[in-house]
Amino acid sequence: MGVRGFPPKPTAIRKLEGIPGHRPLAMNEPNYLSGIPDRPSGMTAAGRKIWDAYISEMAHAGVLRLVDGSALARLCENSAELNHLKQGMRTMARQIELKARGELKERLKAYRAHPAGKKPTLAQILPAGNGLTAFLMKPEGRRLRNTIGDLEALINVQQREFGLTPSSSTRVQTTGSFGGAADPLDRAIA
C-alpha cells in the first residue's frame, strides 16, 4: 500500500509560512549536516560511474546530506545491476535470433523440397516475432523480465527518496548549496 497524502512540510518551511494551521511545530525533526557523502568502498565499477553521475547532478542543488551515502550507494548498485540484466537479456535474445536464422534456412530448404500439393504455409515455417519475443516466451525469459520489473520498481522508489523523478522533484526542498544549512529566511528572500 502506498503512502497517503502529502508528505509533512519541514519545520523551517512551516515557520516561513507563518504556521497557518496553528498546530504545534515538530521538535524532533532530525537535522543532518548537508554535504556530499563519501563514496562507500566496495562498489562495482558500473556503480561508481552511476554514483559520479548522480553526485555531479545533485551536488549543486544541496539535496545531499552526509548520511545519504549508503542509500545513494544502494541506488547506484541497483541501477548498475538493472543495466547488466537488461544487457544480458538483449544478448540472450540475439543468440536465440541467430539460432533461429540458422534453423530458418533449413526450414526453407525443406519447404522448397516439399511436393507442390503438400507444402505447409510460410506462416507455419517462419517463427513469430523476434529473438526477444522468443526469449520472453520461455520460462527463464519471463522470470528475468519479472526480476527486471521488480528491480525497476525498487529503483523508482529509491529515486523518489532523492527527488530524482519528475513528480518527486517538486516535493524535495533544496538549499541551493551544500556548504551547510542556510538561514530559511535568507532562502525565502532569495
Image: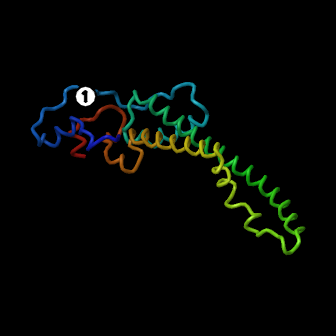
Above or below residue 98? Residue 48 is above
Residue drawn 69% across and 50% down? 93
Rendered location of residue 158, percent (x, y): 43, 38
Crowd band around label 1 with a 10 angstrom C-alpha radius: few (<14), some (14–19), many (20+):
few
Rendered location of residue 64, percent (x, y): 39, 35
Could you tell me which secondary element the residue under label 1 belongs to?
A: loop
Above or below residue 27? Residue 128 is below
Query: Quarter of the image containing the N terminus?
Result: top left
Rendered location of residue 108, percent (x, y): 84, 65
In the picture of the structure, the residue carrying the numbered disc 1 is 29
Task: Report the label total.
Answer: 1
Rendered location of residue 47, percent (x, y): 56, 35
Residue extending furthest toward the bottom: 116
Residue drawn 12% across and 36% down? 23
Residue extending furthest toward the left: 22
* Front residue of 156 and 51: 156
Above or below residue 127? Residue 10 is above
Residue 148 lies in quadrant: top right
Residue drawn 21% across and 35% down? 11
Q: What residue type is labelled 1?
A: Glu
